[in-house]
Amino acid sequence: MFKLIERTAGILKKQNVENFDIYGVESSGFSVEVKKGSVEKVKTSIKKGVAIRVVVDGRLGFAYTTDVSDDGIRIAIECAKENAKMASQDEYSLSMPASATVDFPLYDESYPQIPVDRKVELALELEAKVMNFDRRIKRVRKASYGDAVTTVYYFNSNDHSFSYTTSSFSLSVLLAAEENGDSQMGWDYDVRRYFSELNVDLVAVRAAESALELLGAKPMKTKKLPVIFKNTVFAEIIEALSPVFLGNNVLRGKSLFADKLGFEVASHVFNLYDDPLQKGGIGSIPFDDEGTVTRKKAVIERGVLKNFLLDIYSARKLGMEPTGNGIRSSLSSLPQSGITNLVVESGALGLEELIKTPEEVLLVTDAMGIHTINPISGEFSIGISGIYYRDGEKVQPVSGMTVAGNLKELLTGITEVGRDQRWVGRVSSPSVLVKSLTVSGV
């Protein structure tokens, strides 16, 4: 791939272009799904491709190809130049040479030595542990293992170049528990950078308990009360909220916080960081996808909005400095502002302590419709399940409930942040206690 990037750069340097950059990706992956002690599905993937941006007469052109032959590269270059002719003139700049360091390995060197049989064994082991956990676990819909290795290559007309390789390993399980005619679904997953860190027991227990604790759940009467969003649920809320911090959305006026930089937007106990240097984060990278060095930066600090997350273009348009958040959603996409790892800073209290803090509280353990949260207005209405507590004691599991409101009120209403940190995708969060929300039921 190095030679391919060099050849592509050599061709571009002879073309009539002002600036260019080349983004190359090589990736491979393996996944297996099991059911009833047998392998249901095995999937392997190998991908390779190159994306090219060119600036011609102040116009940006873009093209990509998975045909990495010389002809495929030449065609992609010509397409990028043709596309530039149809673009509007603007000012574009590319990253300059820089050095970056990550103080932990992004790639698990043991990957090539992991036998396929061992990967299948992990999925089967996960299914078996779930089924043996409790007699009320009746079915495992799916148990799976997956892994992926990706190498990124970058070169631009400023002679800025780098490459790095990342790895990830995952386990997931979906199950059903039944008792007295009631059925509840349970699910859990875990993603790690290193194979040795996968924990089958932990995933099995969390998945089983997530279903068992809701058996017999029913709606409560509508009421206003303190609400704890469990770590996994709040992580999903933060992910849905993340577009409000992105420079591209700020530019287009599609952000709830577009004019709130430097203002208080959350409770003073709430801190949120974009941190590409987190060892446990699958979004950890030394450079973003347009070559800017990444760094940890506060998004919200003690409730105050400190930074937007910016790629080079949105930073220039907003009169700010790039933050190392130029992210490509795929090879076929231009880099735009995006998250690396969003981390809600932990507090001092464990989940049990959070539950005992108010006289009564609803612990939300599962939510549906989080993706419908509006990042422009902040309005939300999501279906929830969970457990109602009084004086720290479990009263009843609940389901079929809805909590609605506005993200501004939710964030400013946070009174306590837990310490039970959990990763969900590229977001890490503990559980949080919100002073009061209206929960609708019967």
Image (tube, helix red, strand yellow):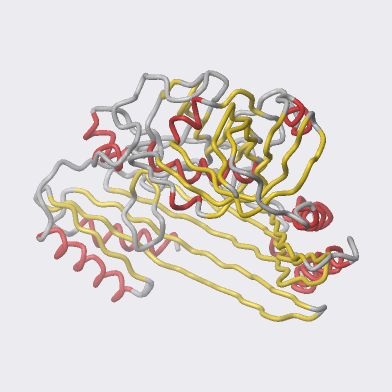
Rendered residue at 43%/52% (across/down): 372
Which one is nearer the viewer's eye here, 57 or 88? 88
Q: Quadrant of residue 110?
A: bottom right
Vertical placement of residue 393 versus 9, above or below: above
Rendered residue at 59%/30% (across/down): 434
Vertical placement of residue 142 versus 339, above or below: below
Vertical placement of residue 204 versus 431, above or below: below
Which one is nearer the viewer's eye here, 151 or 116? 116
Rendered residue at 37%/56% (across/down): 23
Which image quadrant: the N terminus? Answer: bottom left
- Residue 13 located left or right of residue 369: left
Which one is nearer the viewer's eye here, 246 or 329? 246
- Residue 385 located left or right of residue 373: right
Q: Position of residue 300 (x, y in %)?
A: 47, 26
Number of on-image labels: 0
Rendered residue at 23%/28% (across/down): 319
Q: Position of residue 239 (x, y in %)?
A: 50, 45
Which one is nearer the viewer's eye here, 88 or 73? 88
Q: Position of residue 228 (x, y in %)?
A: 65, 35
- Residue 362 located left or right of residue 72: right
Q: Position of residue 273 (x, y in %)?
A: 51, 31
Vertical placement of residue 368 versus 435, above or below: below
